[in-house]
Amino acid sequence: MKKKYKIFLFVVIAFFFLSLFFFIGNKKFSKVKIIRISPKLSSRAIASLLKEEGIIKSENLFILLLKLTGKEKRLQAGLYELKSWSTPLVIINKLAKGEVAIISFTIPEGYTVVQIANLLEKKKLCSAEDFIKIANERELEGFLFPARYTIPSSVSVEGIISIMQEKFKEVINGYQEKLKGKSLKNIVILASIIEKEAQKDSGRPIVASVLYNRLKKHLPLESCVTIEYALGEHKARLSSKDLLLDSPYNTYRKQGLPPGPICNPGKASLEAAISPAKTKFLFFVSKGDGTHTFSETYTQHLIGKEKLQKAGKSN
């Protein structure tokens, strides 16, 4: 009887401690953790990752539970949102069903491929390096539409890029009539410059008119933002050395459009590039508040620039 009692007591104690592991979450980690399970990870590697992140208390007991539930080889890759009250059993069921997190993110207007890539990496959706590599190989700067997206975290980097491309096509398809006889690439290049030059929608068509007017007169665009793109950084004021930069994106030295877009423009900038205002302006200078002073002649431009510089506003 004593032997049976000891066995019974052992079973009860063992069941109690196993229950603590199987059915009680690890309260020590933060309320929510985002964990990425990479493809081809073994169940042992997944258990090790969860232990390392403080989500489970024991790798071996987690593996045991996987075997008991028959789900050792059914865990799926993806980004998972795990809560502090998630028990090992709940975690296993979530991973086995592939209940990946749904991620929402916003790509601001005017973001470059590099900026988008860094944002997505911070969201743990993909590697910035992978995103940049694919986007650059396909020459997609300018053609990834800035908007708010909500996607399953299991979507591949190619899938994310395709979603952004489709959004761009959806928007641009609304302008098919106005685009007849025009180069879409040139429109996007102009829209990207407009996006960076004009902060307010009301000024975009006028900025567009200046660019078109200068192109018609075979004048260099002399756009600071194209040089900044070549430099890979924004500057409050370009130096004389910057203006001499040997780059096809230096529109002070090179006539015509740069070889490609300098960012991913929003709808207002695309509209401005497609339907610019009708003006005779050839120059503009930023007032520093998102608006500009426009001029028809270089003399007027210099007078306006001098006034703004004295006021400490021009860029």
Image (cartoon, rainbow, N blue to C red):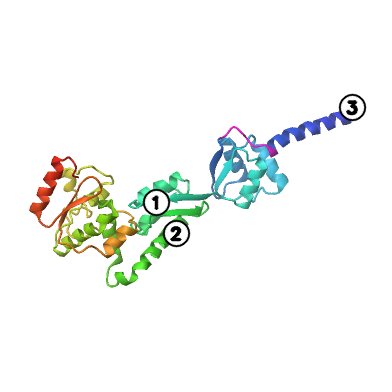
Q: Earlier in the sequence, mark 1 or mark 3?
A: 3
Residue type indicated by callout 3 = Lys
Name the foreground residue: 246 vs 179.
179
Residue type indicated by callout 2 = Ile
Which x, y percent locates residue 184?
A: 30, 66
Residue type indicated by callout 1 = Ile
Please, is residue 247 above or below residue 29 in the view?
A: below
Q: Earlier in the sequence, mark 3 or mark 2?
A: 3
Q: What residue is rendered at 46% in x and 46% in y?
A: 123
Residue 259 in view of the camera: no
Q: What residue is rendered at 27% in x and 61% in y?
A: 272
Magenta span of residues: 23-29
**Callout 1–callout 2 Cβ contact below 8 Å:** no
Report, in whole angstroms, how far the alpha carbon at label 3 lies from the one at label 2: 68 Å
* Secondary structure mostly seen in the magenta stretch: loop
Q: Earlier in the sequence, mark 1 or mark 2?
A: 1
Which x, y percent locates residue 253?
A: 16, 54
Please, is residue 258 above or below residue 241 in the view?
A: below
Q: Which residue is mark 1?
A: 107
Can you tell which quarter of the image residue 256 is in?
bottom left
Q: Magenta segment: does it hold 28? A: yes
Name the foreground residue: 166 vs 131.
166
Q: Which residue is mark 3?
A: 2
Per the rendering, the mark at residue 24 is none
Q: Which residue is mark 2?
A: 163
State which mark lies toward you, 1 or 3.
1
Q: What residue is rendered at 53% in x and 53% in y?
A: 154
Name the foreground residue: 236 vs 80.
236
Please, is residue 270 above or below residue 10 in the view?
A: below
